[in-house]
Image: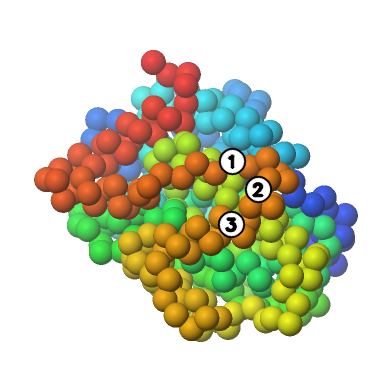
Amino acid sequence: MPNSDLLDLEAAREVFESSQDFTIGLEEEFAILDPATLDLADRFDELKTAAQSDPVLAESAAGELIASEIEIRSGRAGTMAEAISLQQDRRDRLFSVADDLGISLASMGTHPWASYLDQEIIDTPHYQRLKKDLGWVAQRNNTWSLHAHVGIRGADRAIEVCDWLRERLPILLALSGNSPFLDGQDSGLSSVRTEIFTRTFPRCGIPGRFHDWAEYAGFIEMLKRVGSVVESTQLWWSVRPHHAFGTVEVRICDAQASAGESTALAGLMVAVVAQTALDLDSGANKGQEPLKDREIEENFWRAIRYGMDGRLVDFRLGREVEARQALEDLLEWSSPAREGLGIDVLLPEKNGSQRARSKLASGQPIERVYAESVEESRDTYTGSLD
């Protein structure tokens, strides 16, 4: 499918009809920093230009609206092990190029003190159009996240996977919380990144239920007809069918300071998509309906606010459950997919926001907490630097 459109819904349907189940693609976003001050540095163009000399990075490194951010993509892999290997290779290459340029890279959901008022938008027609269309929203979005793509065969099936997957997203977000700080202060949220991004961007957050491809395509065709969207990448939902790849893309999680945590979290995201598909295939959900939008929204907010320190609501049983228990339940439920796909999930006792707050409570200033996060990223995302 040509990248210039991606809104040909019949062509997108055909992509899903010929897609292969459970292929995997990973995407990680990094902040570009001045190594001396750890302030955001608008050096994307310089970093991207240098990456062009590496044929792998030339294909896998990309921009994401703001000039202080760069993303790397694993490309399509047949297994989780292959996806991890591909992504690690790209991590090594990117960090090496950045090091040669005197650039530091960070992996956290937000920058703890950078002002969005200083933000620059990448100077390409695509991103300048978004700047014009979105106004303040584009300016405000200095956030970084982790995405996972999972191949799903069948257009109707992909929409059903998205519909059922929505209620699993809050616990993934709670687990990924790694953005407690903003504007030089503790925001009080586990993921202030999510509050910024999903509450400001249009067509964002956890979408409503679409039931099948016809209903989904009808809505997107209407948005196209009235000029709301000109390409499918303007659908910024936390889970979406990717028109070009034939994948279900999960976009709910904060970027992770540790490469190991990023890999583990990505593996769990993949397993949750796959298990959702397996449940649909086996009829495990027969006689049930996905949670209502307002029910999912309640848990979405709890995940944003409290992360793994809070409780989610089990609406089917009508009671609260500790986030840690909800995670254990998710791990147990997804175990068939993880076993079938060879996915190991080694999760820490505390997520990034919890660890950052512990350091803050011990007397470390936010600047030092962030510096240690940057060091952790450098130490774990690449083994090629001294």
Q: Secondary structure at mark 2?
A: helix
Q: CA distance from mark 2 to mark 3?
A: 10 Å
Q: Secondary structure at mark 1?
A: loop
Q: Position of residue 376 (x, y in %)?
A: 35, 33
In the image, farthest residue toward the top: 386
Instruction: Say few, some or many: other residues with alpha carbon within 10 Å of mark 1 (under 14 / 14 to 19 / 20 or more).
Output: some
Q: Is residue 57 rendered to the left or right of residue 304?
A: right
Q: Earlier in the sequence, mark 2 or mark 3?
A: 3
Q: Is residue 253 visible?
A: yes
Q: Earlier in the sequence, mark 1 or mark 2?
A: 2
The numbered mark at residue 338 is 2
109, 272: nearer the viewer? 272
Instruction: Say few, some or many: other residues with alpha carbon within 10 Å of mark 2 (under 14 / 14 to 19 / 20 or more).
Output: many
Q: Position of residue 163 (x, y in %)?
A: 67, 72
Amino acid type, callout 1? Asp
Q: Earlier in the sequence, mark 3 or mark 1?
A: 3
177, 142: nearer the viewer? 177
311, 100: nearer the viewer? 311
Q: Nearer the viewer, mark 3 or mark 1?
A: 3
Identified at 59% across, 53% down, the residue is 269
The numbered mark at residue 332 is 3
Q: Quadrant of the C terminus?
A: top left
Instruction: Say few, some or many: other residues with alpha carbon within 10 Å of mark 3 (under 14 / 14 to 19 / 20 or more).
Output: few
Q: Secondary structure at mark 3?
A: helix
Q: Is residue 138 visible?
A: no
Which residue in the structure is indicated by mark 1? Answer: 344
